[in-house]
Amino acid sequence: MSLTIANARLDGERVGVRCADGTIAALGPDVAPEPGDEKLDAGGAHLLPPLVNGHTHAAMTLFRGSGGDLPLMPWLERKIWPVEAKLADEDVYWGARLACAEMLRSGTTRFWDMYWQPAATARAVSDAGVRATIGAPLFDLHGSPAQLREMAQRGLEALEGCGPRIEPALAPHAIYTVSEESLGWIGELSAERELPVHIHLSETEKEVQDCLAEHGERPAFYLDRLGLLSERTVLAHGVWLDPDELALIAERGATVVTNPVANMKLAVGGVFPHPAARSAGVAVGLGTDGAGSNDSLDLLSDVKTFALVQKHAAADPTAIAAAEAWAVATGARAPRLGATPLERGAPADFLLMRANSPELGIGELMADLVYAAAGAAIAHVVVGGEVLLRDGEVPELEEIVARAAERARGLGL
Amino acid sequence: MSLTIANARLDGERVGVRCADGTIAALGPDVAPEPGDEKLDAGGAHLLPPLVNGHTHAAMTLFRGSGGDLPLMPWLERKIWPVEAKLADEDVYWGARLACAEMLRSGTTRFWDMYWQPAATARAVSDAGVRATIGAPLFDLHGSPAQLREMAQRGLEALEGCGPRIEPALAPHAIYTVSEESLGWIGELSAERELPVHIHLSETEKEVQDCLAEHGERPAFYLDRLGLLSERTVLAHGVWLDPDELALIAERGATVVTNPVANMKLAVGGVFPHPAARSAGVAVGLGTDGAGSNDSLDLLSDVKTFALVQKHAAADPTAIAAAEAWAVATGARAPRLGATPLERGAPADFLLMRANSPELGIGELMADLVYAAAGAAIAHVVVGGEVLLRDGEVPELEEIVARAAERARGLGL
């Protein structure tokens, strides 16, 4: 399968792109199609890297709009946990299909997921054609370390052989829901099998205070002592990380994924200290968190909120520039998240955004992308050389929305 | 001209709407078309009030993406004022046409504008078919009160006879750019001719400190002493209003329009005290501010940011509920902004939003609208019984974008 795209625009120049065997076979001003290639005229659209959603719970699209503007604990206890207890594979599958469709429409082609029935999410990701790093959430707060190990093994087995677009991960929920013993075991397994670790860290101030009270050290130091802080680690949130923790995280090569919209919606009270993280050299990515607590999966919208809240928190409009916010959203500042460059030999994953859309026709491209563009500006999305969004349309969208809505109704949502 | 829409959804019920002579002639479950009516099947779409953008500078679409993430004064001095000095009518016209197109695509049908060449903006509004309250910005910082009066009179004359969709206003720029004498004169003229007054107030903390130092009172009290605080007054920003000012504003019946995105982007440091304004009984609306400092005109996006920043500032997820944020964005909490109800006899202005769009299919409608929906969910927009956006398309959009981009390039933007 091969595809040649003509008439795209990269850094102001007209270029073509040829995709073969899932990778970029040619990219430049003189690219010509070869016999048998599918052809696509980009009509002068901007060729851009896709966005990487560094932290989400994809199937929680089923819980969208049922949060009732509640605080975290009442929301979990009243709205989420009673329903999650009865989730079936097909619920997770259609919730995740809906999530993939929404992410494609807003320019995201890869995401980091932590949710129940990971094999159902993996099937949805494969059917949608996108990419994901997936882990079943691991807890032993109300169970034993032995049960957690079994859950972890079952989760990994379920994700075996899911194809090249699925990367399995270990996803311990948080330091306050997983025991010290289990965290240590997860660290060993991660090292032994080279598996990424995806964990919530330092989302609320209470988590930090509790960690200090219980372990005498702050969350990042606690994780490090248990062998869980490495270049394989992706820390979601990091709102309350202090300068010493940021320095340690940078030294270990771990990644922090900030989720500004979910943090503001749940009103955790703080803002991820991005300027300090940048100074410390921390790898940073951007996430939406789940649709239950955002309530969208639109990273193109959230990159604006990210830049805005950083400027606001610093009381300084120069605290972050558009190009930097964009780099964070595309995964360019966090290699472990799995973004790939727009160059020959790399996976053929990219966006084509209409240069003549109202929000992209005037001004600097980076500023327009971050502060003005919406998903409506995305003409085509290509993953592994396949056109997954064409002229703004996701195939089978109507069925996906209907099936997900039906599953949500079936769960009483 | 008459139009009958079938198969819409209002508060969960199937309804039809018949529009005649610009108003809603019938609304309910049993509305049938009359001979000669244009017919539109809404396909089960939600019938909703349109959004009201309470503060913008429409033609500043031309300045989008050229702010360079700068602070307010360097941005104005380096990027804005040198170009504004050479603006032609056609620049303002095409900039405002682009603004109207973007607002329609994101659900806004009425806006409050403050910008140069107001007649060109009025022409753009009329050609686009939307509604606006328009005022030329009035300054006498570098001129005389006599010159300001002449500017004001010229601005009002230019807006005479622009048709029923244009409301002229007096738009003194701010208390720090208009003299006490001129503010007093504007207050008298507003009372005499029943003209709305649209003014920036309390955007930065410095403005408040300067007002205290110069006049010995806070900005709202200063305006009130000059006769400028009435039910005709629309105050843009209000970030630093204190409880006494909020009580005074409520007593006078004036409106505050909060512009959360522009405030965060320019990093003014504070957040409009919405919970206190609500307790005081202040009429509150929502604005985007100009595309030069936002950089979009997408109020459907900004209503989410409004709710998020209020929750964040209060460190309380219950600080504002989705339904309240939506009411603010539609103008339902600020009668002077000109929103009209969805009922028989009212102007036929409304949105039809696809109930089967990915973000609207699951959960409570208000939460989905505020936290998840994007402009792509808007199927049709009707103003005065005319379909201005049909199946998501603005007529002549390609030409509007091209002409606005051409004008921006001509200005060296």
Image (spheres, coloured by chain):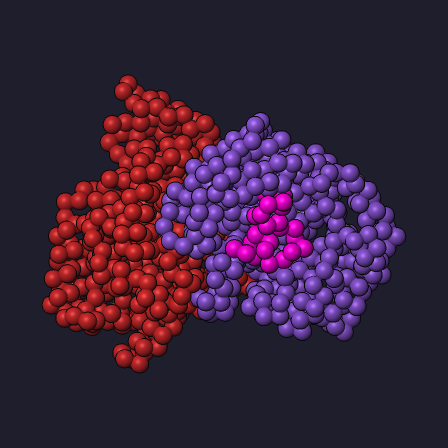
Chain colours: A purple, B red
Which quadrant is home to the C terminus of chain A? top right
Where does the image place residue A218, in percent across and percent down from the top left?
71, 70
Residue visible at 45% across and 32% down in the picture? B45
Number of marks in picture? 0
Residue positioned 28% across, 36% down in the render? B384
- Is B58 magenta? The answer is no
Q: Position of residue B133 (x, y in %)?
A: 25, 50
The outermost residue toward the front is A30
Query: Predominant secondary structure in magenta?
Result: loop
Residue B218 is left or right of residue A27, and the answer is left
Q: Nearer the viewer, residue B390 or B3?
A: B390
* Residue at (65, 50) in percent of width and height: A338
Q: Position of residue A200 (x, y in %)?
A: 69, 58
Left or right: A198, with B91 as reference point: right
Q: Quadrant of residue B56?
A: bottom left
Q: Is residue B10 visible?
A: no
Residue A342 inside the magenta-drawn segment: yes
Q: Quadrant of residue B261?
A: bottom left
Q: Quadrant of the N terminus of chain A?
A: top right
Q: Is residue B99 visible?
A: yes
Instruction: Judge by depth and name the residue closer to the eye, B407 or B26.
Output: B407
Q: Residue furthest top?
A: B35
Q: Is residue A139 left or right of residue B347?
A: right
Say above or below: A36 vs A204: above
- Between residue B161 and residue A288, name the one nearer to us: A288
Q: Which residues are magenta?
A: A326-349
For image coordinates 64% across by 73% down, the residue present is A243
Measured from the top left, where is residue A339 in percent x and y? Answer: 62, 50
